[in-house]
Image (cartoon, helix red, strand yellow):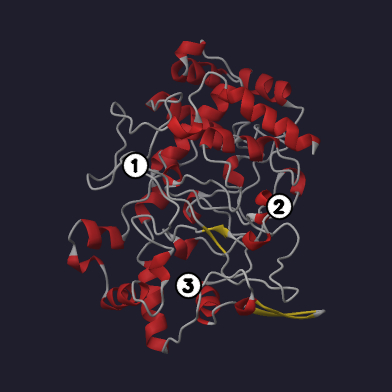
Amino acid sequence: MAANRTLAGMMMAMAVGATAIGAAFPGDAPDYDWAIPAWLPPPPVPQDNPMTAEKVELGRHLFYDSRLSLDGRTACASCHEQARAFTDGKALAVGAFGTKGHRNAMALANVGYSPALTWANPHLRRLEFQALLPMFGQEPMEMGLAGAEADIFDRLSADETYAGLFAGAFPERRGAIDLFTVTRALAAFERTLISADSPYDRFKYANQTDALSASAKRGEELFFSHRLECYHCHAGFNFTDTFRTSKGAFDEIAFHNTGLYNTDGKGAYPAFGEGVSQFSGKPEQTGAFRTQSLRNVAVTAPYFHDGSAASLDEVIDHYAAGGRTLRLPGGESVGAASPYKDSLVGGFVLAPDERADLVAFLESLTDETFLTNPAYSDPWPANHPASANRRMPGS
């Protein structure tokens, strides 16, 4: 509880002088070059953190800097690897000193378009504030900075590289290296992580009819059919029903129980995996988690909030069954029978060739440009203190 109060206090302090959350996203950033296709509106940008190239570059350096952690080995990039669409390939994320987390590391592609930024917390809706959770959260520890803020900022201040980067990014604050500038730079960089050049994008939005294979086109028909119902939750440009752009009139936010667990026959989920009910106290929201974007889904395994599905085939098995059945020491967990399961997860039957087509469609959402874009890559030399001791994703 003390840790939660400390974190809440930091969020309130950072909000002083800023606009209210609901009014903080007036539109796009007209003077910033997003380098995105014309058909895609840019993500919304808060009034108190306008986009600049200098701020983004500072955020990129911070994102890959392992000194932004208590053990000096854990960077944001330790759980978010570009080649995996900024996931880490592990079932559960691992924080400083090898601390195992409670959640699968979320993909960051198009994170700036999401008005809900964690698996189940409906209150964290700004990237500037969300950064506080991995930095200072203690249950579980991620970067472990609680109580060590002064030491970390002194560590960054001693690096001559940052003197120029902070001065260029925050001239109005005279290049101050503090919590305000660090979190805003990280948020600015994360808003640039835009994926919009998959084969499906080229087929759907650029009229390149040969960008998709015949199998993937058949898979698209299945995906958007009433028979499978995938599109109801995985909708729109970002294949999720939690979405916003700078042109939208309101935020779309949704959480769903997909029948992963039903450990007591009454809808229970394992400890630390209760979903939205952990924050709302409402039993009917047990097991409700944010709909994940399917962009680059073929490279972001394992899947679900706890990484309990190792492959796309296992995910399809789960939805085809209308909920997962597990054998537990005390009996079976029949997710399909959960009283809290979303009614759209009703199950379906796929022939082997149809399953192959569906997988081909999901694989067509992989954006190789995004996975290799130098603008998102590690800016630090291999022997620099920021990267020399960094724990790499998957390790």
Q: Is residue 136 above or below residue 31?
A: below
Residue at mark 2: 101
In front of the other: 219 or 290: 290
Identify the secondary structure beneath mark 2. Answer: loop
Residue at mark 1: 249
Name which residue type carries label 3.
Leu
**Mark 2 surroundings within 10 Å by alpha-carbon count, few (fewer than 14), some (14 through 19), many (20 or more):** some
On residue 136, which mark appears?
Answer: none
Identify the secondary structure beneath mark 1. Answer: loop
Residue 60 visible in the displayed image:
no
Indicate the position of residue 393 as horizontal and vertical percent values. Answer: 60, 51
Indicate the position of residue 313 as horizontal and vertical percent values. Answer: 51, 77
Residue at mark 3: 344
Q: Residue furthest bottom?
A: 351
Name which residue type carries label 1.
Ala
- Labels 1 and 3: the sequence-earlier one: 1
Q: CA distance from mark 1 to mark 3?
A: 26 Å
- Labels 2 and 3: the sequence-earlier one: 2
On the image, which quarter does residue 45 sit in?
top left
Q: Is residue 67 above or below residue 210?
A: above
**Mark 3 surroundings within 10 Å by alpha-carbon count, few (fewer than 14), some (14 through 19), many (20 or more):** some
Q: Residue sitting at 42 percent across and 82 percent down?
A: 355
